[in-house]
C-alpha cells in the first residue's frame, strides 16, 4: 500500500528513512558480513553504535554531564518498580501526581514499596478536562521524590510545567520525550519506553542525576539497579542491541531534522491543524482543555459513535491506520509522534472532513 | 564479504533464511504498509505472530499443557532474580549447582534473596575438566528448587543428565535450548535468553510449570512475575515485538529443518568434526572431558598463545569471525549454535589445519 500513515499509539511508526536504512543494512552491516544484531555487544563495532547513540541523545536533550544515560530493559512498567527501588533510600514515602491512566499505573506499582502520597491533579476548567498547575501541587517535603507522567497517551493530556520543589522530580516521558524542549537539569530521573518517540519496543531510556545512584534498596534485582547499569555502561546483561542501534538511527534522524527545537515547531503545527479542525467541526469532539491537550496523542469522539467502525474501515482504506482509541476510553485516537509527517495529519483532517460531510 | 561464518557466542548469528525474510518484509509487512515493529502488540496481526511463535515452540519442545510459555524482558540475568522471587514461596533456601561461570552468576544474584545451598559439581576426570554426575548431586530436600545451567558458554561445558529429585528443577538453557531433545516434564522452570538459539537479544523465554505460578514474593516487580505474565499472555507491559516476531521466524525455520531431533543430529556432527580435529592436533587443545564437552561452545587454545591475534586476523580474512575467547579465559571459542551450518565448521577446521601447518 502506498503512503500509509500510521497513527499507532505504540509500538508506533518510526521515521521512514530510518526504516529504509535499517532494511538496507539488515543482513550485511558495516562491512562485517553479518547483521548488527548478530555481533557481540562488547565488540568495538557495537560499542561505537552504543556510544554514538548516547552522545546523540545527550546532544538532542542537552543532558548535563552530571546525568547518566542508561539503556534499560523491561519498558516503563519496569521503571514503575525501578524508581522506588532505586530512589526511596531510607524514606518511606514518595509523592505521585495523578493526571491519568499511566500515572495511576505507576502508583499501583509504587504502593508495593512505599507509602504513596497522592496528588490528584485532575480538574475541570471551562467544562473541560484539565490538570491543576504544577505550582499548586501539594508536595510532602518528606517524600523521597515526586513522580508524574507529563504525557498521558490514553487521556490525551500533556503537562508542560514543573512543580516548585527541592525534591527530585521523576518523569515518565515515554510518550513525549524528544518531542519538545525540556530542561533536564530540573529533573532527578527521566525515563521513557522507546516505542513511541525513540525506537522499537524492548528498550527504555533512563536519564539519572548521578547523586541519585547511591540510594538503591539492597534487594533490588541487579539488572534494574541504576548504579549497576551506570557502572557497566548499560551492559550488565546483554542489552537489546538491535533496539539500541535503531534508537541511535532515530536520534541521528532527529538531528538531521534540526533537533528537538525544530521538531517541536512541527509538532505544534501538526497538533494545531488537528485540534483546530476538531474544534471547528460539530461532528468530532475532544474534551481536554487547550492548556493540557497532548501534542502527541489526540483522542477524539464521533458525534455518532455507531459509525466508529465505518470510520476506522474507511480511514484504513485511505492508508490512515491504527486510529482506534484505547479500549479504556473508546472512540478514536491519532498519535502524532515525531515520526508522523505533517502530510499525514493533513491527510487525516481531509478524510475526517469528508467523512463528516457524508455522515453528518 | 561472501560466505561469512559467524562464531559469536551471543548475540549470535541467526539463520540466513530468517534474516533474509525479515529483511524483505522489514518496511512493509503482511500487507499493512508498515513494519511488524510499528503496530500495536494488541493488534490482531501481532497477536497472531505471538500465538504462532508460542505454538511453534510448544511443538518443537513438546511442551506439556500444564506449562506456560512466557516471553520476558531483561534476559537471563533478570531470571537470576526472577527465579528466587517467583519460586521461593515460604522456603528460605534453594540449591544451586555450580559447574561454571553462569551458574556462579546466578548464585550471586540468588544470595540476595535466600540461603543458597551450593553443590560444587566441578571435578576432574582423567586429567580433564568434568562435572559430577547429576545423580550424585547432594540436594537439600528443604530447598525450594534446584537450579543449574546445563550449558556453560565460557567454560565450554555441557550437562546432559538430571538429578533425581522431587524438587522443581530450574535450568538456565540460554545457550543450548532447542539444540537437543529434552523432556520438559522433568523441569519446573526452563528459561533462556534468546540471543543464542532463539533470536535477537532483548527477549527471554520462560517455560513454567503451572503449579509454580502461585509462590511469588509479594514485592516482586510485577513485570517479573510469572503469574502476571501468564495471566496477561506476556503482555502486561509492551513486549519486545520485533524480537518476538524474529524468534517466531527462527522457530518456523527450525521446524523446516526437521525440528529438534534433526538439528540435534547436525549439532552432534558439527561438534564431533571440531573436537575430533582438535584432539587429533598437537597445535590446539580443549581441556574438557568428552562427557561434558559442550556441543554449542567449543573453547580451544593454541599451543602458541602469542599467535592468538594472528590466528584471529587470518581467520577473519577467511570470513571466520568472532572466534575470540571470552575475556575471562582467553584463547579461542567457536560457538556453533543451531544456525551455524556444517559447512562453517568444516571451513573452520580447514583453516585451523592450515594455520597449524604454517605455524607448528
Image: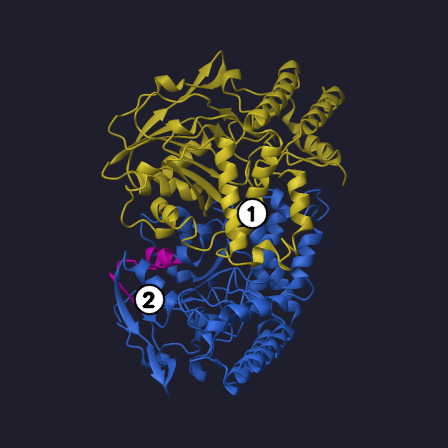
Chain colours: A blue, B yellow
To which residue does mark 2 refer?
A145
- The answer to which of A117 and A107 lies nearer the viewer is A107
Secondary structure under tag 2 reads loop
Q: Are marks 1 and 2 in contact (CB under 8 Å)?
A: no
The image quarter containing residue A251 is: bottom right
Q: Residue B111: in sight, yes or no?
A: no
User: Residue beneath label 1, please?
Assistant: B245
- The percent position of residue A70, horizontal first and vertical second, equals 48, 56
Which labelled disc corresponds to residue B206? none
Quarter of the image for residue B150 reads top left
Q: Chain of mark 2?
A: A
For numbered disc 1, what is the local secondary structure? helix
Q: Residue at x 52, y 38 (%)?
A: B56
Q: Which region is colored magenta? A: A79-96
B351 in relation to B247, above or below: above
Query: Are there few (<14), some (14-19), or many (20+) residues within 10 Å of tag 2?
Result: many
The span from disc 1 to disc 2 (Cα, nearest Å) is 38 Å
Residue A258 in percent (x, y) is at: 64, 73
**Residue A294 located left or right of residue A266:** left
Residue at 68% of width from left, 53% of height from top? Answer: A23
Say above or below: B41 vs A141.
above
Q: Decide: is A139 above or below A55.
A: below
Residue B91 vs residue A225, the one in the foreground: B91
Furthest residue in direction top, as rendered? B126
Amino acid at each position: 500500500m502506498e503512503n500509509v500513515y500510521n497513527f499507532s499509539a505504540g509500538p508506533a511508526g518510526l521515521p521512514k528513512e530510518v526504516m529504509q536504512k535499517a532494511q538496507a543494512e539488515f543482513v550485511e552491516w558495516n562491512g562485517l558480513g553479518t547483521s548488527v544484531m548478530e555481533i557481540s555487544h562488547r565488540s568495538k563495532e557495537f560499542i561505537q553504535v552504543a556510544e554514538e547513540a548516547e552522545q546523540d541523545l545527550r546532544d538532542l536533550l542537552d543532558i548535563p554531564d552530571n546525568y547518566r544515560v542508561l539503556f534499560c530493559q523491561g519498558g516503563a512498567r519496569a521503571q514503575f518498580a525501578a524508581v522506588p527501588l532505586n530512589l526511596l533510600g531510607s524514606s518511606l514515602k514518595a509523592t505521585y501526581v495523578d493526571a491519568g491512566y499511566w500515572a495511576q499505573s505507576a502508583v499501583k506499582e509504587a504502593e508495593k514499596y512505599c507509602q504513596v502520597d497522592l496528588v490528584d491533579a485532575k480538574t475541570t476548567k471551562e467544562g473541560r478536562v484539565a490538570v491543576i498547575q504544577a505550582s499548586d501541587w501539594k508536595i510532602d517535603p518528606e517524600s523521597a521524590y515526586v513522580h508524574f507522567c507529563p504525557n498521558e497517551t490514553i487521556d490525551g493530556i500533556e503537562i508542560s510545567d514543573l512543580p516548585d520543589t527541592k525534591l527530585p522530580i521523576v518523569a515518565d516521558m515515554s510518550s513525549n520525550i524528544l518531542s519538545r524542549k525540556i530542561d533536564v537539569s530540573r529533573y532527578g530521573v527521566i525515563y521513557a519506553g522507546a516505542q513511541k518517540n525513540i525506537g522499537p519496543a524492548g528498550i527504555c531510556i533512563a536519564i539519572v542525576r548521578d547523586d541519585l545512584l547511591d540510594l538503591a534498596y539492597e534487594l533490588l534485582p541487579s539488572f534494574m539497579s541504576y548504579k549497576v547499569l551506570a557502572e557497566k555502561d548499560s551492559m550488565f546483561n546483554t542489552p537489546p542491541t538491535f533496539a539500541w542501534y535503531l534508537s541511535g538511527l532515530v536520534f541521528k534522524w532527529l538531528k538531521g531534522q534540526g533537533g528537538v527545537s525544530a521538531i517541536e515547531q512541527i509538532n505544534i503545527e501538526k497538533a494545531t491543524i488537528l485540534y483546530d479542525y476538531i474544534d471547528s467541526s460539530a461532528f468530532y469532539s475532544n474534551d481536554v482543555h487547550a492548556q493540557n491537550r497532548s501534542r502527541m496523542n489526540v483522542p477524539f469522539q464521533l458525534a455518532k459513535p455507531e459509525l466508529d467502525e465505518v470510520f476506522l474501515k474507511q480511514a484504513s482504506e485511505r492508508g490512515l491506520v491504527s486510529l482506534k482509541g484505547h479500549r479504556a476510553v473508546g472512540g478514536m485516537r491519532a498519535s502524532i509522534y515525531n515520526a508522523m509527517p505533517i502530510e499525514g495529519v493533513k491527510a487525516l483532517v481531509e478524510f475526517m472532513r469528508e467523512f463528516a460531510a457524508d455522515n453528518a
